Image (tube, grey):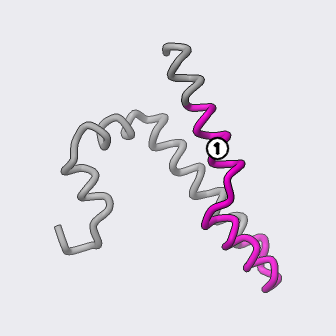
C-alpha cells in the first residue's frame, strides 16, 4: 500500500478522534444518565464495523459504485 494512502488514513482517523461530533454528544448524554458502558460499547462497535468494512475493500466498492452507496444509505424498502 502506498505510504500516501496510509498517511491519509491516519490523518482522517486522527480527525475523527479529535473533532467532537455526534458520538461525543451521545457519550456525554449517556454519562449524565449513568449508562456509559452500553453507549461506549455501541460507539466502539460502530467504529469497529466501519474499520472492518474498509479493511475488506468494500469502501472502494461503495466509493466507485453510486448504486451501492444508495442501497446502503436508503431506508429499507425504498430502493
7 w.r.t. 46: above or below: above
Q: Could you say where residue 35 lies in the image, as x and y percent from the top left?
A: 77, 79
Residue in the foreground of this view, choosing between 21 and 44: 21
- Which residue lies most toward the bottom here? 33
Most common secondary structure along the magenta stretch? helix
Q: Residue at x 71, y 48 (%)?
A: 18
- Which residue lies most toward the front here? 19
Assess whether residue 16 is covered by the magenta stretch: yes
Q: Residue at x 68, y 59 (%)?
A: 20
62 w.r.t. 41: above or below: above
Q: Quadrant of the C terminus?
A: bottom left
Crowd band around label 1 with a 10 angstrom C-alpha radius: few (<14), some (14–19), many (20+): few
Image side of residue 2 versus residue 19, left or right: left
Image side of residue 50 versus residue 26, left or right: left
Start-end of magenta stretch: 9-38
Which quadrant would residue 53 be assigned to in this image?
A: top left
Write down the residue under mark 1. 15
Q: Could you say where residue 78 lies in the image, as x and y percent from the top left?
A: 19, 73
* Secondary structure of the residue carrying numbered label 1: helix
Q: Could you say where residue 6 lies in the image, as x and y percent from the top left?
A: 56, 23
Image side of residue 9 versus residue 39, left or right: left
Amino acid at each position: 500500500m502506498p505510504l500516501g494512502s496510509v498517511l491519509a488514513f491516519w490523518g482522517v482517523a486522527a480527525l475523527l478522534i479529535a473533532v467532537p461530533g455526534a458520538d461525543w454528544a451521545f457519550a456525554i448524554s449517556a454519562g449524565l444518565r449513568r449508562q456509559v458502558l452500553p453507549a461506549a460499547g455501541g460507539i466502539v462497535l460502530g467504529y469497529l464495523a466501519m474499520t472492518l468494512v474498509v479493511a475488506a475493500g468494500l469502501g472502494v466498492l461503495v466509493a466507485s459504485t453510486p448504486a451501492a452507496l444508495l442501497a446502503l444509505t436508503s431506508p429499507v424498502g425504498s430502493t
